[in-house]
Image (cartoon, rainbow, N blue to C red):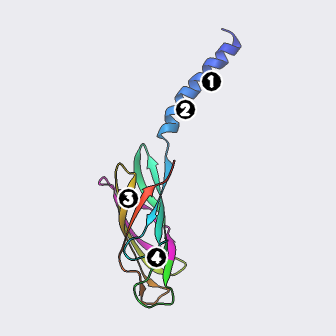
Amino acid sequence: MSRLRFISIGAALVAALALPAIVLAAHHETYEGPVEGGQSNNAGVEFFTRVRNGDIKNVHRFHWFNVLVVNSCPQGAVSGKMRLRMPVNDQEKFHGTGENHPHNAAVHVTGQFTHQDRRAHGTLRVHNISGGGCDTGVVDWRAKRGPL
């Protein structure tokens, strides 16, 4: 067997073995959408998911922006992010409680994926903003998966 043919067959075998690993490897998806219920036109959420073997494993980097507070506070609206990773269970649901460091606020997020994981919906509450009594109340959000 010629050396060139041996190298060609070896390269083809490596490529054939690597392709399934690339397809099954973990990757990330982005979701974004509006916050509902009397919010400003540009209030919304954005988050990322970790996907492995076609299943969403967790939600991370949950961001919210321009969400109105329900009581009179110096901040008319709040934006921030929660760095907590939230595992996704077999019913496609997730939840988490954490902190928003710029405002030292407590954050609670719930959510569920629907429509073959192309959409998600849930609730968000940010309270004790800057150590005061400022609160967004529980607001509903919905999001769609972004382009691949």
Going by the numbered disc 2, the residue's amino acid type is Ala
Q: Nearer the viewer, residue 12 or 75?
A: 75
Q: Secondary structure at mark 3?
A: strand
Q: Which residues are magenta?
A: 79-99
For label 1, the residue is 11
Whether pointer 4 and pointer 2 mark residues with C-beta atoms closer than 8 Å, the reply is: no
The residue tagged 2 is: 18
First-in-chain label (3 vs 4): 4
Q: Residues within 10 Å of mark 1 (few under 14, many from 20)?
A: few
Distance Cα–Cα, label 1 vs label 4? 56 Å
Tell whether label 3 touches label 2 (CB within 8 Å): no
| Three-letter residue code for mark 3 | Ala
The disc, 2 or 3, on the residue closer to the chain's N-terminal end is 2
Give the side of residue 22 with respect to residue 52, left or right. Answer: right
Considering depth in this image, is 71 or 27 the residue closer to the camera? 71
Residue 116 % position (x, y) = 35, 48
